[in-house]
Image (tube, helix red, strand yellow):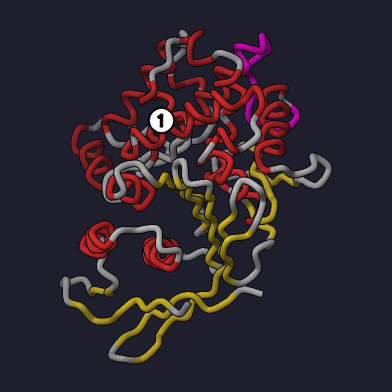
Amino acid sequence: MSEVVLHFTRAGHVENIHRGDAVAVNCSGEIVSAIGNAHLPMFWRSAAKPFQALAFVKNGGLERYGITDEELAVLVSSHSGEENHVALVRGILAKLGLDESVLDCGVLRPLNGKAFKKLLVSGEPITAVHNQCSGKHSQIIALAMMLGVDVSGYIRPEHPAQKIIFKHVAMASRMPEDKLEIGIDGCGVPVFYLPIYNMSLAYARLSTPAKGDWGDYELAATKIRDAMSKYPQIVAGTGRMDTAVPEVTGGRIIAKIGSDAVFCMAVKDGDLGITFKVEDGSFATVTPMTIALLKHLDLLTKDEAAELDRRFPPVLKNHRGEVIGTIETVF
């Protein structure tokens, strides 16, 4: 059962109570720490993206299309639609001989407010390339091209590229294929439903590929991990938690958000994967929950913890910038 993890207060009174579940797992599948239900089944959402890219990387996609490490980072990103993100996705599509009209992720305004305002001022249209999932979609399109199949319909579960991705997500998370369920994500592609334990196990294996028993996929997993560690601003964006954690820790901890308050982390060469899900899906809980969980697991130095607290103080402010409440950890 989910446990109370956060209190949001106002004038010394608890105004909002948030419940959640979290689990840290090593490559051997041992639970190192848990809060609530370590086996809570949940949609992985965008936190699955590193594993959705496994087939593309393993089968030589980086070499075939000349994909750089920075471009690999955007292929597994939920980017903020900043200029560098958009340029990277457009550059990848150009390498494929395509343009953004091929993207079937839907049109979405940039997550970054400054980038959105700049588009409005310039009069440049918002297109699918600004969608936070345009990198992932570019990767799936490239995989379809490598398979020699029609790109049309690449978002559908029955498409050959999606069938291969499904098998790789099951393999990475050690889920039997007949137990791995799917739904449809916000960007139209299949999204995976599995226990948060298995999500953490996949991230543990990603954290330390040499211990993860990847077989022929060890190099692919290492490349994905290292791209995320090296280019955290590409994986997410300015001011976001899954950029801040690797920035502050010097790439030692990589992180990936999923919609509705799913969040995964991997300790590079530390044999540890971590997942949490806040029950009500509140985006406002992700930042304080991430910092609290890293402290709870003693994964931050004193300076790293202080820097994250400086960037994201656990307080609530009104529209005038006045502090009117606190965010308190309850575990």
Q: Is residue 251 left or right of residue 28?
A: left
Helix, strand or loop under label 1: helix
The majority secondary structure of the magenta stretch comes to: loop
Q: Which residue is mark 1?
A: 227
Whether the magenta-drawn stretch holds residue 36 is answered as no
x and y percentages locating residue 213 in the rendered image: 65, 34
Quadrant that contains the N terminus: bottom right
Q: Residue at x 58, y 27 (%)?
A: 218
Between residue 207 and residue 140, name the one nearer to us: 207
Q: Is residue 300 left or right of residue 23?
A: left
Q: Residue at x 27, y 45 (%)?
A: 238
Q: Residue at x 26, y 31 (%)?
A: 83
Q: State the image quarter where residue 68 is shown.
A: top left
Whether the magenta-drawn stretch holds residue 154 is answered as yes
Bounds of the magenta segment:
144-158
Q: State the image quarter where residue 188 is shown.
A: top right
x and y percentages locating residue 154 in the rendered image: 64, 25
Which residue is situated farthest in the right direction here?
178
**Neighbour class for label 1 at 10 Å: few (<14), some, many (≥20)?**
many
Between residue 188 and residue 180, name the one nearer to us: 180
Residue 154's place in the image compared with 298, above or below, is above
Name the amino acid type tagged 1. Answer: Ala
